[in-house]
Image (cartoon, grey):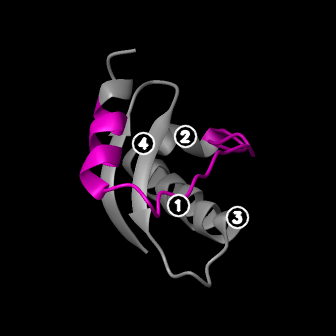
Amino acid sequence: MLIIHYQSTESIAHLLVNVKPTDSASFVMQRVKGRASSYLRKEFPELLKLPTLWTPSYFVGSVGNVSTETVRKYIEEQRNK
């Protein structure tokens, strides 16, 4: 998995990633959330008190027919909403 672009606010994160066609969306999100949780708990030990950092929900969309630059611009525009 390769993270191409990332943008977040206090309540939401947008990721543009390149993944293998054989990797399922649930597998990719499990890896993203698990790795992020691990890094955040190392950086902020007070988070160890929380049972979880993420809700179980997520949205995944495919962008096969749209340019990477178009998706990048869309993600950047979400910051201003």
Which residue: 57% across, 67% down? 31
Q: CA distance from mark 4 to mark 1?
A: 18 Å
Q: Examine the rendered structure and indicate whether residue 10 appears above or below residue 75.
A: above
Query: Any mark on residue 44, and which?
Result: 4
Query: Which numbered dot is residue 47?
Result: 2
Q: Residue furthest front?
A: 65
Task: Give the label, 4 or 1, closer to the camera.
Answer: 1
Count residues near mark 2 (Cα–Cα under 10 Å), then give few for <14, some for 14-19, many for 20+: some
Q: Secondary structure at mark 4?
A: loop
Which residue is located at x 29 percent, y 33 percent?
A: 76
Q: Earlier in the sequence, mark 4 or mark 3?
A: 3
What amino acid is found at the position of numbered circle 1 in the picture? Val
Q: Which of marks 1 and 4 precedes in the sequence?
A: 1
| Magenta stretch in the rendered image | 49-76
Q: Residues within 10 Å of mark 4 (few under 14, many from 20)?
A: few
CB under 8 Å between discs 2 and 4: yes
Q: Is residue 10 in the magenta section?
A: no
Residue indicated by mark 1? 32
Q: Earlier in the sequence, mark 1 or mark 2?
A: 1
**Number of numbered discs:** 4
Could you tell me which secondary element the residue under label 1 belongs to?
helix
Under circle 3, the secondary element is: helix
Q: Nearer the viewer, residue 31 or 52?
A: 31
Q: Quadrant of the N terminus?
A: bottom left
Q: Amino acid at mark 4?
A: Phe
* On screen, residue 74 above or below 18: above
Q: Nearer the viewer, mark 1 or mark 3?
A: 3
| Label annotation for residue 26 | 3
The amino acid type of the residue labelled 3 equals: Ser
